[in-house]
Image: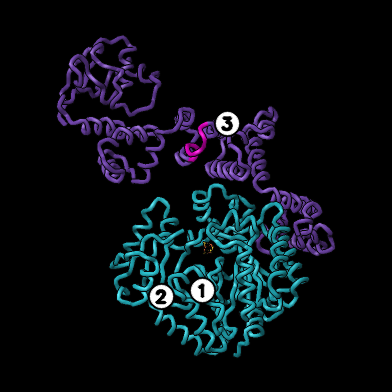
Chain colours: A purple, B cyan
Amino acid sequence: MITNTAFIRLAQIDLQDRAFKISTEQSLSGLVTSIAEIGLIHPPFLIHRKASSYSIVSGFRRVQACRDLGWSEIPVRLLPADASPLSVLSLAVADNAQHRELNLLEQARTVEKLASFFPSDIELAAYSGCLGLSFNQELVSRLKRINQLSSPILDCIRRGCLSLTIALELGKLEVKAGEALARLFEEIRPTLNQQKEICSLLRDIACAEDRLISDLLETGEMHAILFNKDYSRQQKLKHVRSFLHKRRYPWMSRFEKAFEENRRALMLPHTIAFKAAPGFEAQEFSICLSFQTVTEFADQIQTLERLPDNPHFDAIINKRFADSDSLY
Amino acid sequence: MRIQTLYIDQTVADLPLCSAIAERLGLTPKRVESPETVYHLISAASDPVAAGKRTLLLTRNKGAFVRPCPGTSYYTCCNYMILHIGTFCVMDCAYCILQSYFHPPMLQYYVNQAEMMAALDTVFAERGIRRIGTGEFTDSLIWESIDPISEKLIHKFAAQEQTILEIKSKSVHINHLLGLAHNRKTIMAWSLNTESVVAGQERGTSSLDARLRAASRCQAHGYPLAFHFDPLIIYPGCENDYLAVLDRLFNTVDPSGIVWISLGSFRFMPDLKPIIESRFPVSKIIYGEFIKGMDGKMRYFKPLRMRLYKRLAAYIQRHAPAVTAYFCMEDDEAWEHAFGFTPAEKGGLPAMLDRAAIQHCGLRD
Ligand code: SF4
């Protein structure tokens, strides 16, 4: 597209027209200093859309920074007034995407603005390649859903606390629950897998107990964890996961606890790792020895030889735990 | 659930059975060049499972008619054979694994029955006891109103001595089967569950009472019987509920005529969970305490299912000691715990079931 370089008075630029705005960055601090010191190296793109004013296509922060510096006019690159809306929008996207990676919200904004030009996600995805983006159909449809999320969740995404997957998961929940979980994740910062686990446990518990997730997050037990001043962030995370696991799997949790107590009562050194099969499904148990010398090895063998006489070992192997006897 | 649309695969359209079925259904069939046309229509529906239950395709079974039951190596399998008469079901159980087993799930009925009968002849010509059932990929009795397939099979099996047919169902279309000369080579079997599971999770099935009454009538006509407590669903109070069903069973039919009773707890591939959640929003069965089993299926936490098994096994052993009770897909630990022995001690599960079939059905090797 051919552009003309011109000088335009800042008063003629419509800052409210955000039709082409892609960037979510608000801060101007570094930019103002840089323009003051070095000048405006890259003039913004503008288009004459309305009779009396110009719309910004790309360079919203640059225009604002120049205003803050008290400039009255700035150099700009003017797009032809009759340029097609899609080509103007494409320039706005490409100008952003060529300089840096667009964040999730900017990608979502891009999809939202482009959507009116393409009848299907697959066509939009194909076109995104021309703009330096590599969206696929699935991503386009997910990004569209981002735009429907409530502002507290969008704020968390902006602050980098939520991934696209989890944000969309939260979007499927009742609004109050989604927002509460977004805040919770921001506070205790679980990994992506832990976030998925917490969402899935909460959903299952809520369905099983016919309760709202937001109510579950308000229970006394959750409050006792989250408002405990003595807990670090990691401790809060650990206790939240443990609380939800116990609530979702009460029998399993009791069984695991009984196993753990008996295993501890065996007083095995840390060089002997004694494990049950995952979920206690297979009948096998495993013991793994770590040693460096023949003497250490001999000591461990002696410890193992005493195990069959230990009532805790018997309880483990036969899965007969006092607390969960009624299970077997 | 009613069949609303009938498709006929072009390659079988000239078989007289197709027009007979169309007439019985009162539907004008639509011919399709290939089953894929129908698969695409079903897949595109908002609820493909429900659409698959309303749409019937009469087609040819291009694969084997007699197949081994798909067991897995870790859990003990009974070496059952499946006679593949059709797929899917018009009833609608929340826990039905067929909802995620077929892609897409769809009613198909195989009308190339001459080939099926030939496949059975091949099986009958081989040496050895065989147990064959029609109720694995479909319900055995749902097809009777459009084609009395069970009647044909009962005749077929009655004429040989080493293979039994098991007809397994949750429905009671048995009137036309009662007077047949079955020669005890057909076992009439029903899946049983507690009243609350039948009412809450089994849409469109016959009531528990109706199933037990049907079993009793079959027994009065000399049929050997079998019962399947599968899937056992664990919920508060389930143990007593299952014992009550056993009690009703033994009060309704004579246990001496029961060839076997199987026990199997609810297990499912993980991809069934979202289907149940969306199709049965009030069902709670997927919120049990499940772990991923050795075969990748979700299973109840083992101590929980072993507790239920133990009580049911003890009850069966006390009230019907001669009946062969067995687990469908469990390991030695579960067997030992509930029955006090492992299948290997009795020659293996297939041998146990073969012996029961020989004894009740007069099979000869
Ligand atoms: S009766 Fe059997 S095949 Fe039919 S829906 Fe129920 S579980 Fe599935």
- Estimate the x, y position of residue A10 in percent, counting from the top left: 25, 13
Q: Residues within 10 Å of mark 3 (few under 14, many from 20)?
A: some
In the image, which is nearer the foreground, mark 2 or mark 3?
A: 2
Q: Is residue A30 left or right of residue A241?
A: left
* Residue that appears at 55% across and 61% down: B205
Residue on which the image places disc 1: B134
Residue occupied by mark 3: A187
Q: Chain of mark 1?
A: B
Give the SS element for disc 2: loop
Residue of label 2 = B63
Tag 2: residue type?
A: Gly
Pointers 2 and 3 in contact (CB under 8 A)?
Answer: no
Using the numbered discs, state the Cα–Cα distance from disc 1 to disc 3 in whole angstroms: 56 Å
The front one of A52 and A247 is A247
Q: Nearer the viewer, mark 2 or mark 1?
A: 1
Residue type at tag 3 = Glu
Residue A156 position, x and y percent, is: 49, 30
Magenta-highlighted residues: A169-175
- The span from disc 2 to disc 1 (Cα, nearest Å) is 15 Å
